[in-house]
Image: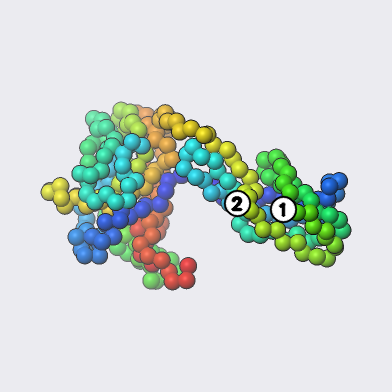
Amino acid sequence: MAASAWAVYNLAKKKIGNSTLNLASTIFRMTLHTSASNANTATLGTFVSLTGEVTSVAASYSSSGKPLINEVWTNAGTASAGQYKFDADDVFWSANALISNIKFGVIWLSAAATTGRHLLCRSSLSTAQFNLAAGNRMTVQMAATGILLLN
Amino acid sequence: MEPQKFVVRLQDAAGELLAWATVYGLPKPQPRPRSCPLWATEPTQFAIEQAGLACEITIHWCDLDVARKTAPMESVHVEPGQVFTYHWIEPLWLVPGSSEMFPLPAVTVRESITIGVPSGMMGVVAGR
């Protein structure tokens, strides 16, 4: 189940630069998507353009995913003090019932208006989609060097 | 997947060993369902041990204990003490995929799992 590194959406780079997408925000969310999703399309802009979210399952997976907790910019902790990371706590889903067809994880900025829900980055959590059986937990673990590493 | 260790042997037509070297093959997977070639990470330098006409190369994937043969583009006479540098124009090994695309049904994971996601890079250190 080798996951791919977080890949920043093309438009997110511009939005970070012109502060449309503020990485000091603490209202990011992560959603899960199926293999039929367009999540891996680099040119997507906002959450409304993203398809194939995992089907909601009561007390297991809710539409619009989960909020990131403790988003922070901090030194990456390497020998090079010039490296900073954008990081957050690990995110987990506990399956009280089967969660189906998981493949991608997407991080995006939450907002009341759909036009403000800017996509930040995505990862292919597995090379093929999978289900999570009831009674189990899936944790998306952030690397020691964070979600995004700024060299 | 880590680079895989291969031992390659330079041989003459009779199968006599002229030289050998260790080569590491790096998997370069293409999107499913295509094949996955393992490419040598660098040209191979054979230190010639015995004189002869080098016309065959055997490639031994050590961990799996499988081997195949290939040949240099042309036979070359080699002498002990020489270094024969071989530039790979083909993969060390090719793991075949399918010629057709087909869906893989989702499997159901029946245990708790942790998926580690590597960091995304927002910049590149000069010189890398």
Mark 2, residues whose alpha carbon is within 10 Å: few (<14), some, or many (≥20)? many
* Letter of the chain that mark 2 sits on in the rendering: B
Residues at discs 2 and 1 in contact (Cβ within 8 Å): no
**Helix, strand or loop status at disc 1:** loop
- Can residue A105 be seen here? no
The structure residue drawn at horizontal position 31% and vertical position 39%, both measured from the top left corner, is: A37
Q: Earlier in the sequence, mark 2 or mark 1?
A: 2
Q: Residue A64 vs residue B2: left or right? A: left
Towards the viewer: A6 or B74: B74
Q: Residue B15 vs residue A21: left or right? A: right
**Helix, strand or loop status at disc 2:** strand
Q: Residue A88 vs residue B114: left or right? A: left
User: Is there one chain holding both mark 2 and mark 1?
Assistant: yes
Of the residues shown, which amino acid type is indicated by label 1?
A: Met
**Which residue was labeled with disc 2?**
B39
The structure residue drawn at horizontal position 72% and vertical position 61%, both measured from the top left corner, is: B85
Q: Residue A4 vs residue A118: left or right? A: right
Q: Which mark is residue B73?
A: 1
The answer to which quarter of the image holds residue A150 is bottom left
- Can residue B11 be seen here? yes
Question: Percent from the top left, x then y, of residue B83?
Answer: 77, 64
The structure residue drawn at horizontal position 37% and vertical position 39%, both measured from the top left corner, is: A103
Q: Nearer the viewer, mark 2 or mark 1?
A: 1
Mark 1, residues whose alpha carbon is within 10 Å: few (<14), some, or many (≥20)? few
Towards the viewer: A111 or B82: B82
* Quarter occupied by the C terminus of chain A: bottom left
Q: Looking at the image, which residue sits at the far left?
A: A113
Of the residues shown, which amino acid type is indicated by label 2?
A: Trp
The structure residue drawn at horizontal position 22% and vertical position 41%, both measured from the top left corner, is: A64
Distance between mark 2 and mark 1 Cα atoms: 18 Å
Question: Percent from the top left, x then y, of residue A72?
Answer: 28, 60
* Letter of the chain that mark 1 sits on in the rendering: B
